[in-house]
Image (cartoon, rainbow, N blue to C red):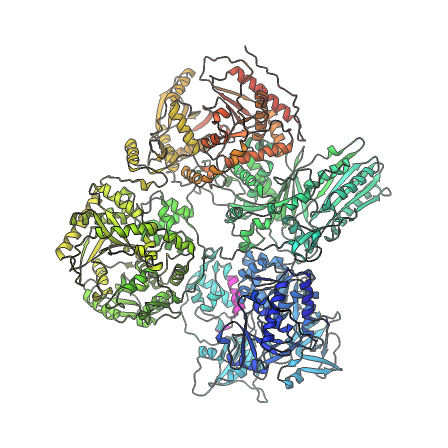
């Protein structure tokens, strides 16, 4: 007899290693599950559990629960699921009914019940494995399996007994009806007390599937549910219809829920399935069938299934379906007579499914389980009918049992529960269906003299009823209506409940008049169907539940809000939700990123040796092909017209040979027992060859027959487990005329293989080796390395929504997709434009097509970032050639960023580099590449694909009498839209393929139009992309009047972050003149201001870490570091309340011996100048205390200040006080003091009463003083700012910014963080030890004096003018922070006072450093202060030396001092505990003025009030911890400093003297800093290693202070070295252009100054007298030389002027290294000569500089001031180089140049000296015809023109040097792909690298492509120094080669600027090189070639000879066409240039 254990054992034997169950964290194989459950069964036997016992399981759902179930079955026991959330007496009743002796639970005393033994489930399940073999109990059909309790009409629940026979029957029914034979993965989501949990747990285990157990929170959180669906590859999900509604709502607004696409079916159960819901699901997910399941618990769960695959009719109810296996259903009337078809009656269930009855209730069993017609049946109470097809339809209940949220509820049981409460007299409960979700409404009558508190009523019911049975709505009535026979009239009550809303039970609260509030409120009103719902109404009291909450979450997302279930349960009102509302931008990216573990097919049991691995692409195709929609999508069809004289005999014989030779052609694809698809080779698989004669048909009928055959053959498809997966058909049309059709599945062949396969067939000689087996064996190529995973994650990070074009939801069709195809042939002019562009720009057609497709996607979706798939061959770098046969093709994701301001060619170059960069991943699984996006949108990242193919020349297959013509190709894709660009010898054709169920014809036509338009724009336009008519985005210039339409776009724009950061910084510092290029700290900011900056950014949904602010040199750099706010915290997660570790500063406090430790506070105050309501203070304080639980922290003093943060805050009423003043604030200080003294006297550390908010009213109602004071243990100065801001916001009715990390999280992570963090802190020990050792000698006071314990105080300050200079001018002069200035003044004051230079002080920092990753405490309330010692020295020289010394000392402090407290108090490091503590403490509290920036009516009080607060905050008996404590602040525009001193250590006169000295020192520094003094130290320039003397020498030599200093690039170093060695003009470059029209040179000069401000390299000079190496420095301003010379039209004057200008050698130490000369004839004809040094710029930049210069000039000439632009600059490139230091150690060049021999070119033509040695450029063109041929040739092969000329130049060198692998210099652009904005950087980035070419390689397509790949590698590896090449070869470059090839891919000549009154033309240039011969190629319509030669080494005659050789080879190659090329080694070029 079969039972569950037998069937499960079979699966264990079949696939022991397959995964059986998982819980999201852990997985168990079938073997593990069997062995562990055996071990648990042994535990049960040891506890005397016997067959037939019922054992309760009190575990949470998880692997332990599943193990318990199976373990109990193995010993013959049954299980009772016991929900720990049930009321205790209900649990006790259930245990008693079942006579349970044992309860299985975790080790939890809370679950213990008297008389019940506790069996503990071990934490480590593996420990149960070991043990003796288990002898399983034999189970019978009627053996009890489980007991599940349902609602009972008697007032107590009924326990339903289900036997093993019924349970197994139901499991098998699920397997059959849900198609579970293919080992699916099932989501286990139901609570264990639900009957549906049984099949979810067990059904997968009897069919080889997997049980994926989800927690309740995972199931209810749709994002987490989607993640688990993907993680566990879930196929089957079961939900109640109301939950399905929430899922659909989420799918509509959240693309992430595309993950539901992978489901094979969705089961709905537990409630009536509305037809509207079914229609909506099938509209949204047509490929996922919906199963409506029905069944009572008493019948082993479901007894009917209705599989819904077609759209149901809108006005008909969804049937409950047909009877499942083993079940007989009968519809009977009240007399038990079976009713005919169509009549409504009660449903009776018969058969094996019928349960054993109700445990302990034979009476109830007899009523429900009856004998009818001799058979046992269950009487369901459900009214149904049966139609003629055996389908049952539901019509309601025959009694008062209802279903709510899937729970079966007897209304009478709920009523009994309510009546158990003494204060309720009567109760009636009805089902309310007036809203979206059905819920219970209770009508109650109170006992006389009682008034029911509904909140208390709900709480009391929790003790007697489960949560799901507590009514959502209560209505208090004076009496209940009755029927005529005296019973309660339930019908009338039901009508009342459904027609009216409940009376008000909550006090009215004013609504928040915001759009967001209205949107959220209306959403709840719609969900609850309650238009009267108010903002303060509790949703759950109005009928809401968790499912409705899910629906609300989904709909709220559509309004831009993100909530969690916890949010709604904690804040169940609209007002409450608004308080914690978060926008979706602020929580983007929080979904968990999950991966899928792949199993090795070799783990499968059985004959697994026959299983062969498959590629990721094949796996994806296999999975998609199992879906009905894509069953035929992957059928590839090729149709040929052939002339075959032999009747096809050779063709058939060739196919049979190929079939036997290639194992892939004989392969089938199956699922291994592991669940993974594998390949199986069937050696005797037959060739599917058919031959058909069509001679009996006329031509027209033959064509029709062939058309029909192609359609039918494709629709036939393939069974993937039955080889061969291809068919060949030969149709005889007449004579020698044949039609040949090949149909193949993509699993075995890709498109590129067809030509090779047909070639092999016709030749009859298979290739020597089948490459596919070798290819597939190297599986590592299919997977990303860790660093590559990060690369893809970075590339895909900008994509937060899928990039899709689908514009319609798929119809609910499961038929195969019928793709629609239409094509366009490109016009001849556009074809020529594309081929010309490819040759000119050095790119492929694929790059052009990809750029155009990116633009087309922009036209549809907008945005800069676009993502699509590209079909790639998969044959690069894998050992697979073009003639190899198999499935190698793959889909590669292509992420692009198209900048609106860039020209098409610049974008094209970027796209080309991106494709080249990603091609190394062409074999990688697309899922792996997209892994980082799964948490955002699963596998639906994009829905379009691009395929670019060069069509094969089928004519090469022809032989005498044999012809082959390709007539039709069908190659489709699963993507919604595909673009195929087919390049042939005579035309370029584009096919557009759409899935009509997703993409409409209108959308397809639009995409086609956009793509073709973009192609044309790319080829013809030179304007920015944003001017293309299809571009969707904000144009750079929106004001037509302010900028000309043809203005050249600048390289970068202000970003929104720039604007945001600038606005916030100005507000914080209080200066509206601050600009983006200024330093935050030098402009008056400080560390406190930095925290304010972080907080303000957070409130706008952005964030930045503190270290980035300190590291940034300007506000612009700060803006670049800003990023969207992500609410993900790494590390261990801690709740905000509970026992809390003390942080270091709290531990310091615990060590102090204080008289009154409770009165040691910190406070602040703010004046509010508007009326403040009396009752608002308490309300707001309550919110503050709830928001920041640290303010209620409790400290047990006797136990070392143990800290606990309670879940419930202290009473706000006791924390607040309001006092009326008789006079103004400043005149009432004594009254204020008295009130505060009294308030603070009641603080209690142990009770957590630590906070006071006191509101002082004045006689003027518009003037109030709010004082906030808290114990210092829970607050610091930053926290006070936060509280003040929050109070002001709440007073104003606005929202409060988020607190990301609560204080307890910080404290716990600080205390429990890992060893790596501890090691990092411990590394600071040596530093702090040195400081500690220096303290005793630096104590400033007489140690013989004894402290008195009395604190005296005096105050000093500065004027407003002096304060303004202090914070705005002085820090800038010294390039430092204001804190450095204040401490420098203190050092000078002490050194003068005590006549000693050293002083030891303690400094206070805010302590909120970024020491814990993922933790943000910028807006957290708590005590974070760090206190640390510092020993300072006054050099007793000038103020500059003093400030330099102080800066150095403070800059050396690691992590701004936070490590000291961690070492001393957290790690107890003895070496940092000083023998003597510093006696002085200094604390700068920042600019208090800016606390009130959120509220214009709030001001800071006077210094008098703030000083008063300091005095009353600490009990004077406590004393101060230092002999002198100095507190400084800026308030009301004045710098104020308070001195608190012990009068036993300092006399009043001494204190006065010291304070005076300090103010005097500060005044001197202010005077010095504002008088033009500028001080810099080497630390100001951290990127270079300069000594102080070297820095001062640099500044003195330049006569100015550099704005920046950084290293040189390797190329710059080489040029500097050559310049210093030779001193000639080799690196002086000169450009000259004609200007026709008016030009104002003064405006042009001003335009250059603006340009230089944008690009610091134009203000750069060089300093080489540094020991550590040369540096480059940038000045704030560098003057460029401009001169005007009158011309006379004489060319000689022009030549002489240019020569003289070149002869003026630049001094590289003095910027600017560029100059201009305007040669003007006064008649609007000018020549502009631009001369610059090559160390600044490369040729790439020239066009950008000229265009941008004249764009600025055009603006200024119109009177428009150009905007400042902060884009990528040359420093960014230098920083990128610094991050690439490891390149120098890479072996690339050592391997590449191994065995390299010098290749030094010498001309065979005799040298003829030239009298004009300066003319060293020989230019010629190739002619338009030859140039066009070269472009077409390169485009056809998919290679660049540059690669072709590399090969030509190598051939010329080989002929000349007799070297078969000649080496020459190759100029690379040097603009890294991974450096954002590198294309826009102005500066020298090009470099010369050695290029080695195999001149013996044939001129074959693959050889040229290989050369192209190696050239791309040179680009990547070229960022190294010249010395690196020298060390790799032992030779300098000049000794390795003497020629260089340069391809100029930037155009300028035809795109020079044109203004309103001028035109530029005739651009020419003169360049020199250290190499004797440079070949420069400028691709254009007519290729220009420049031979730049050293006249001392070469002559013009020799250049003429070179011209002939270049032309000769160019013609030879281009004449060979697009076929395979072979190089004739005997072909030589005779020299045509002889001497003379």
Q: Residue furthest front?
A: 132
Measured from the top left, where is residue 1153 in percent x and y?
25, 65
Q: How many marks?
A: 0
User: Measured along the vertical axis of the image, is residue 313 above or below residue 1938?
Assistant: below
Report the side of 1660 relative to 1023 (left or right): left
Seen from the viewer's position, the closer of residues 1723 and 737 is: 737
Which residue is nearer to you in this view: 1068 or 1732?
1732
Q: Is residue 1491 left or right of residue 1979?
A: left
Membership of 551 in magenta stretch: yes
Compared to 1686, does 127 lie above or below? below
Location of the C terminus by quadrant is: top right
Where's residue 1348, x and y in %?
A: 16, 62
Q: Residue at x 65, y 56 (%)?
A: 603
Front residue of 722/567: it is 722
Q: Is residue 441 left or right of residue 1121?
A: right
Region rendered in magenta = 541-555
Q: Residue furthest bottom?
A: 485
Q: Residue at x 65, y 60 (%)?
A: 264
Main secondary structure along the magenta-highlighted residues: helix
At x 31%, y 37%, the residue is: 1587
Q: Residue furthest top?
A: 2036
State which quadrant residue 1076 falls in: top left
Can residue 512 be seen in the rendering of this structure?
A: yes
Residue 1827 is covered by the magenta coloring? no
Regarding residue 271, the answer to whether it shows in the image is no
Task: Specify the quadrant of the image occupied by residue 1837.
Answer: top right
Image coordinates of residue 881 in percent, x first then y, are 66, 38
746 horizontally vs 1767: left or right? right
| Residue 642 place in picture, x, y as percent | 79, 37
When asked about the image quadrant of residue 242, the answer is bottom right
Q: Assign the N terminus to one quadrant of the image.
A: bottom right
């Amino acid at each position: 007899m079969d039972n569950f254990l037998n069937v499960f054992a079979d699966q264990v034997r079949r696939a022991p290693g397959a995964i059986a169950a998982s819980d999201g964290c852990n997985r168990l194989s079938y073997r593990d599950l069997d062995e562990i459950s055996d071990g648990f069964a042994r535990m049960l036997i040891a506890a005397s559990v016997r067959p037939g016992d019922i054992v309760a399981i009190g575990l949470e759902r998880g692997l332990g629960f599943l193990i318990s179930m199976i373990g109990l079955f193995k010993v013959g026991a049954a299980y009772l699921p016991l929900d720990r959330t049930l009321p205790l007496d209900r649990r006790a009743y259930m245990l008693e009914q079942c006579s349970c002796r044992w309860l299985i639970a975790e080790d939890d005393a809370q679950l213990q019940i008297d008389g019940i033994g506790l069996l503990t489930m071990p934490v480590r399940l593996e420990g149960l494995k070991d043990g003796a073999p288990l002898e399983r109990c034999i189970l019978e059909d009627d053996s009890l399996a489980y007991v599940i309790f349902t609602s009972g009409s008697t007032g107590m629940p009924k326990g339903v007994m289900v036997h093993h026979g019924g349970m197994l029957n139901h499991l098998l029914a699920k397997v059959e009806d849900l198609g579970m034979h293919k080992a699916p993965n099932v989501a286990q989501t139901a609570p264990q007390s639900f009957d549906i949990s049984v099949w979810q747990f067990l059904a997968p285990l009897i069919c080889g599937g997997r049980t994926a157990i989800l927690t309740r929170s995972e199931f209810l959180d749709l994002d987490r549910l989607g993640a688990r669906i993907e993680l566990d590859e879930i196929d089957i999900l079961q939900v109640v219809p109301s939950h399905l509604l929430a899922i659909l709502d989420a799918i509509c607004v959240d693309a992430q829920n595309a993950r539901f696409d992978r489901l094979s079916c969705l089961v709905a159960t537990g409630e009536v399935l509305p037809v509207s819901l079914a229609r909506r699901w099938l509209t949204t997910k047509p490929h996922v069938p919906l199963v409506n399941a029905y069944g009572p618990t008493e019948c082993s769960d479901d007894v009917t299934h209705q599989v819904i695959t077609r759209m149901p009719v809108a006005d008909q109810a969804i049937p409950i379906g047909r009877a499942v296996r083993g079940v007989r259903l009968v519809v009977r009337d009240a007399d038990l007579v079976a009713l005919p078809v169509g009549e409504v009656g009660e449903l009776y269930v018969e058969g094996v499914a019928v349960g054993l009855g109700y445990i302990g209730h034979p009476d109830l069993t007899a009523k429900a389980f009856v004998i009818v017609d001799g058979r046992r049946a269950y009487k369901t109470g459900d009214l149904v009918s049966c139609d003629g097809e055996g389908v049952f339809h539901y019509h309601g209940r025959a009694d008062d049992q209802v279903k709510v949220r899937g729970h079966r509820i007897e209304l009478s049981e709920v009523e009994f529960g309510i009546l158990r409460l003494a204060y309720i007299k009567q109760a009636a409960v009805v089902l309310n269906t007036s809203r979206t979700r059905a819920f219970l409404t209770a009508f109650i009558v109170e006992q006389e003299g009682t008034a029911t508190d509904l909140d208390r009523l709900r709480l009391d019911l929790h003790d007697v009823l489960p949560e799901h049975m507590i009514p959502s709505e209560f209505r208090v009535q004076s009496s209940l209506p009755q029927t005529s026979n005296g019973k309660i009239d339930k019908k009338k009550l039901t009508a009342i409940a459904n027609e009216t809303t409940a009376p008000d039970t909550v006090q009215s609260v004013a609504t928040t008049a915001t759009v967001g509030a209205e949107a959220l409120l209306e959403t709840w009103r719609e969900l609850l169907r309650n238009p009267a719902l108010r903002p303060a109404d509790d949703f759950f009291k109005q009928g809401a539940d968790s499912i409705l909450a899910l629906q609300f979450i989904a709909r709220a997302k559509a309004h831009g809000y993100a909530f969690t279930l916890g949010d709604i349960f904690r804040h169940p009102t609209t007002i409450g939700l608004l308080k914690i509302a978060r926008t979706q931008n602020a929580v983007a990216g929080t979904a968990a990123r999950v991966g899928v573990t792949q199993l090795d097919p070799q783990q499968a049991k059985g004959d697994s040796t026959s299983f062969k691995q498959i590629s990721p692409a094949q796996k994806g195709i296999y999975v998609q092909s199992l879906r009905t929609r894509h069953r035929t999508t992957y059928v590839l069809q090729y149709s040929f017209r052939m002339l075959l004289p032999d009747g096809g005999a050779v063709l058939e014989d060739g196919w049979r040979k190929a079939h036997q030779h290639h194992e892939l052609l004989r392969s089938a694809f199956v699922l291994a027992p592991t669940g993974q698809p594998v390949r199986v080779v069937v050696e005797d698989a037959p060739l599917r060859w058919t031959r058909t004669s069509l001679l009996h048909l006329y031509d027209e009928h033959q064509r029709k027959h062939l058309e029909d055959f192609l359609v039918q053959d494709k629709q036939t498809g393939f069974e993937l487990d039955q080889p061969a997966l291809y068919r060949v058909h030969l149709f005889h049309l007449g004579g020698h005329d044949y039609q040949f059709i090949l149909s193949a599945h993509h699993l075995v062949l890709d498109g590129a293989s067809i030509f090779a396969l047909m070639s092999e067939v016709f030749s009859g000689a298979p290739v020597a080796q089948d490459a596919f087996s070798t290819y597939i064996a190297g599986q590592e190529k299919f997977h990303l390395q860790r660093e590559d995973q990060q690369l893809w994650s970075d590339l895909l990070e900008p994509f937060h929504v899928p990039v899709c074009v689908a514009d319609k939801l798929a119809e609910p069709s499961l038929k195969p997709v019928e793709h629609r195809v239409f094509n366009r042939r490109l016009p001849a002019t556009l074809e020529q434009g594309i081929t010309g562009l490819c040759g000119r720009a050095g790119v492929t057609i694929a790059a052009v097509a990809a750029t155009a497709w990116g633009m087309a996607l922009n036209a549809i979706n907008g945005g800069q970032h676009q993502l699509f798939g590209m079909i790639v061959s998969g044959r690069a770098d894998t050992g697979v050639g073009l003639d190899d046969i198999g499935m190698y093709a793959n889909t590669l994701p292509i992420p692009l960023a198209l900048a609106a301001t860039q020209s098409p060619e610049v974008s094209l170059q970027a796209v080309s580099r991106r494709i080249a960069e990603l091609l190394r991943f062409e074999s990688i699984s697309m899922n792996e590449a997209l892994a980082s996006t799964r948490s955002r949108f699963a596998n639906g990242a994009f829905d379009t694909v691009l395929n670019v193919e060069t069509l094969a020349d089928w004519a090469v297959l022809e032989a005498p009498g044999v012809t082959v013509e390709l007539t039709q190709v069908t190659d489709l894709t699963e993507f919604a839209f595909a673009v195929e660009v087919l390049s042939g010898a005579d035309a370029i054709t584009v096919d557009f393929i759409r899935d009509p169920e997703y993409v409409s014809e209108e959308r397809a036509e639009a995409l086609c139009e956009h793509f073709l338009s973009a192609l044309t724009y790319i080829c013809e336009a030179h304007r920015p992309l944003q001017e293309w008519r299809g571009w969707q985005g904000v144009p750079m210039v929106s004001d037509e009047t302010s900028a000309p339409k043809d203005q050249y776009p600048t390289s970068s724009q202000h970003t929104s972050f720039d604007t945001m950061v600038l606005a916030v910084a100005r507000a914080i510092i209080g200066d509206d003149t601050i600009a983006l290029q200024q330093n935050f700290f030098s402009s008056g900011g400080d560390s406190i201001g930095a925290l304010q900056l972080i907080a303000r950014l957070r409130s706008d949904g952005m964030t930045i870490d503190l270290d980035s602010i300190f590291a940034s040199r300007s506000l612009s750099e700060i803006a670049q570091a800003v990023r969207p706010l992500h609410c993900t915290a790494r590390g261990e997660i801690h709740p905000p309340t509970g026992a809390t570790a003390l942080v270091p500063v709290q531990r310091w406090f615990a060590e102090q011996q204080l008289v009154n430790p409770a009165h040691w506070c910190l406070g602040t105050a703010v004046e509010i100048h508007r009326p403040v309501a009396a009752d608002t203070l308490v309300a707001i304080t309550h919110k503050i205390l709830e928001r920041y639980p640290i303010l209620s922290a409790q400290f047990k003093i006797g136990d070392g200040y143990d800290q606990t943060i309670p879940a419930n805050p202290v009473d706000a009423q006791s924390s607040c006080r309001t006092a009326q003043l008789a006079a103004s604030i400043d005149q009432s200080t004594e009254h204020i003091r008295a009130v505060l003294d009294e308030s603070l006297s009641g603080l209690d550390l142990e009770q957590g009463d630590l906070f006071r908010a006191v509101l002082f009213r004045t006689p003027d109602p518009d003037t109030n003083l709010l004082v906030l004071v808290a114990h210092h243990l829970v607050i610091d100065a930053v926290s006070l700012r936060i509280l003040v801001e929050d109070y002001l916001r709440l007073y104003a009715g606005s929202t409060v910014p988020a607190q990301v990390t609560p204080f307890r999280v910080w404290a716990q992570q600080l205390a429990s963080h890992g060893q790596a963090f501890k090691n990092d802190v411990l590394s600071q020990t040596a530093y702090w030890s040195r400081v500690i050792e220096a303290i005793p000698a630096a104590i400033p006071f007489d140690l013989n004096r004894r402290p008195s314990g009395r604190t005296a105080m005096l105050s000093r300050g500065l004027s407003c003018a002096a304060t303004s200079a202090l914070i705005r001018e002085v820090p800038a002069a010294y390039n430092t922070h204001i804190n450095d200035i204040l401490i420098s003044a203190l050092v000078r004051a002490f050194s003068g006072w005590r006549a000693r230079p050293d002083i030891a002080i303690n400094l206070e920092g805010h302590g909120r450093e970024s020491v814990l990753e993922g933790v943000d405490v910028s807006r957290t309330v708590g005590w974070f202060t760090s206190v640390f010692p510092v020993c300072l020295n006054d050099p007793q020289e000038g103020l500059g030396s003093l400030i330099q010394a102080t800066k150095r000392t403070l800059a050396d402090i690691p992590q701004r001092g936070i490590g000291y407290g961690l070492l001393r108090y957290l790690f107890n490091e003895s070496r940092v505990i000083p023998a003597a503590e510093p006696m002085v403490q200094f604390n700068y509290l920042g600019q208090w003025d800016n606390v009130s920036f959120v509220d214009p009516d709030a001001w800071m009080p006077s210094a008098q009030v703030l000083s008063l607060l300091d005095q009353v905050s600490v009990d004077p008996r406590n004393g101060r911890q230092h002999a002198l404590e100095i507190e400084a602040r800026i308030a009301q525009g004045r710098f104020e400093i308070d001195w608190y001193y012990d009068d036993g250590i300092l006399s009043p006169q001494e204190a006065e003297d010291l304070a005076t000295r300090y103010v005097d020192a500060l005044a001197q520094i202010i005077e010095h800093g504002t008088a033009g003094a500028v001080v810099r130290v080497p630390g100001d320039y951290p990127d270079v290693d300069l000594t102080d003397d070297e820095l001062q020498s640099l500044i003195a030599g330049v006569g100015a202070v550099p704005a920046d200093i950084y290293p040189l690039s390797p190329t710059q170093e080489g040029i500097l070295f050559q310049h210093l060695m030779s001193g000639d003009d080799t690196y002086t470059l000169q450009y000259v252009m004609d200007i026709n029209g008016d030009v104002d040179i003064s405006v042009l000069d001003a335009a250059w100054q603006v340009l230089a401000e944008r690009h610091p390299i134009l203000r750069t000079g060089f300093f080489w007298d540094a020991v550590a190496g040369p540096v480059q420095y940038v000045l704030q301003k560098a003057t460029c030389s401009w001169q005007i010379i009158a011309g006379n039209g004489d060319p000689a004057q022009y030549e002489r002027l240019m020569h003289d200008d070149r002869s003026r050698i630049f001094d590289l130490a003095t910027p600017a290294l560029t100059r201009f000369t305007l040669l003007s004839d006064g008649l609007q004809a000018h020549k502009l000569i631009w001369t610059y040094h090559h160390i600044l710029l490369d040729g790439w930049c020239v066009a950008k500089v000229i265009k941008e210069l004249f764009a600025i000039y055009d603006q200024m000439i119109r009177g428009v001031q150009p905007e400042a632009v902060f884009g990528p600059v040359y420093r960014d490139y230098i920083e990128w180089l610094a991050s690439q230091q490891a390149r120098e150690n890479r072996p690339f060049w050592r391997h590449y140049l191994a065995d390299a021999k010098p290749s030094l070119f010498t001309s065979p033509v005799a040298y003829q000296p030239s009298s004009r040695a300066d003319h060293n450029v020989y230019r010629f063109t190739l002619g338009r015809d030859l140039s066009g041929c070269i472009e077409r040739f390169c485009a056809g092969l998919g290679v660049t023109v540059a690669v072709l000329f590399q090969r030509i130049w190598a051939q010329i060198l080989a002929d000349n040097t007799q070297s078969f692998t000649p080496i020459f210099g190759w100029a690379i652009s040097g603009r890294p792909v991974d450096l954002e904005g590198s294309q826009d950087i102005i500066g020298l980035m090009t470099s010369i690298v050695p290029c080695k070419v195999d001149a013996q390689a044939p001129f074959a397509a693959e050889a040229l492509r290989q050369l192209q790949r190696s050239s791309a590698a040179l680009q990547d590896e070229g960022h190294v120094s010249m010395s690196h090449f020298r060390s790799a070869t032992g030779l300098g470059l000049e000794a390795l080669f003497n020629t260089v090839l340069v391809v100029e891919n930037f155009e300028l000549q035809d795109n020079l600027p044109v203004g309103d009154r001028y035109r530029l033309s005739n651009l020419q240039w003169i360049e020199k090189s250290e190499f004797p011969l440079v070949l420069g190629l400028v691709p254009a319509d007519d290729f220009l070639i420049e031979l730049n030669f050293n006249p001392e080494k070469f002559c013009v005659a020799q250049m003429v000879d070179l011209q002939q050789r270049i032309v000769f080879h160019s013609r030879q190659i281009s004449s060979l066409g697009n076929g395979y090329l072979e190089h004739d080694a005997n072909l030589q070029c005779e020299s045509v240039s002889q001497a003379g």
